[in-house]
Amino acid sequence: MIQTKHRRFTIKLFFLLVLCCFASPPVHSCTIIVLTDTNRALFCNNEDVDETKNRIWFIPSGRQRYGCAYVGQAGNQWAQGGLNTEGLAFDWVAGSHEKWTQRSEKKKLPRGNPSERMLETCSTVGEAIAFFQTHNEPSFCYAHILVADRTGASVIIGAKDNRLQIDQRSSSRGFGYGGRVLAAMLPQQGEPTVTNAGAILSACRQGYGTKYSNVFDLKSGEIFLFLFPDHPDPVRLILAEELKKGRHYYDMREIKEQLSQKPRRPSRLKEWAKNLYCWLRWNPWGSWFWMRWLPSATFGRTRSLEPTAAAPGKLSGSWSHNAVVADESALPAAVAQFWRSHKI
């Protein structure tokens, strides 16, 4: 009798858990906040990721390119957020699931990470909106981007029913995992100070899932990095000063030691590989090349590769052996052609 009741209770509990799973709203990762008034505009972000090794890297200005600081994972060098010399910043909140056509003949395909290309070439929220209206960004199927400029204007861009959704505002705002906490704290601590930003970010953390927090001052170019809960005091960097050092990076967890050391240069090979990966996955000719040549010409084995939801540039999959194609000379030729046309 007791076993029968226990069994019934277990079955009811199981179905209740299943119902909760399907009824619960999507869980967002990361929290992004804009704190602004007439004198200051702060762009704040909690990065919620599984990756433990994260970094900030700097790319000076070049031909038709603004100088930028990017934050993201060290392994794939795929920027999750960033700030440029014009006072424009961006970051992403993942967790949505929307219908979004990744490729369109009417839209341009950027080289590599589209949001990195946006930051390199845009200086205002209006220009950022125009960029995503004319360039492909596959990440809109699972994430929303928040872009803000030095005037305090901001926009959240996402997708709904295969259309871009654009939400502009010129006041303090935020969204993401810590939305409820943010709604309660923003009216009391909405003044754009680094102290308020740090307090709100700390309260919105997703436990140990938040690997780092950053605050960008969009007018002064100051960067503040928080490593809660172990290092609550921020590390302060100045974008203009860092760009004078050339291309370099700091690992988040070792940044205090690395600041006094010789600058570390980011891998150009990783950047090239990231650009190649995006071209192969998102360009019609690249997709043909990927399916026809790449699997069978890679050391005699193939790999099933898919971008992860948290980081499109990070690949996951498994290897399986396959026969080598008869004419492997086509592979280096195609790669060489891509390298000539997409050299950074």
Image (cartoon, helix red, strand yellow):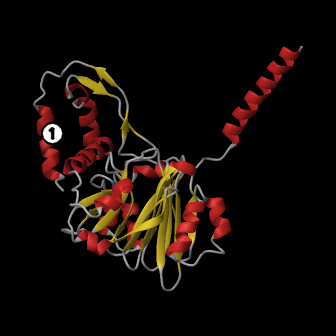
Above or below residue 117? Residue 122 is below
- Residue at 48% x, 85% y is 39
What amino acid type is highlighted by mark number 1? Ala
Q: Quadrant of residue 121?
A: bottom left
Above or below residue 284? Residue 67 is below
Give whichever of 209, 281 is nearer the camera.
Answer: 209
Question: How many tags in the picture?
Answer: 1
Q: Quadrant of residue 306?
A: top left
**How far from the left and from the top, in percent, is residue 212?**
46, 56
What residue sits right under mark 1 in the picture?
Answer: 334
Give whichever of 89, 145 is nearer the camera.
Answer: 89
**How far from the left and from the top, in percent, is residue 337?**
13, 45
Q: Quadrant of the C terminus?
A: bottom left
- Residue at 56% x, 56% y is 205
Above or below residue 19? Residue 209 is below
SS at circle 1:
helix
Q: Quadrant of the N terminus?
A: top right
- Residue at 55% x, 63% y is 201
**How far from the left and from the top, in percent, is residue 30?**
52, 55
- Residue at 82% x, 25% y is 9
Left/right of residue 123 with respect to residue 7 in the rendered view: left
Extreme-right residue of the structure: 1
Left/right of residue 87 with respect to residue 283 in the rendered view: right
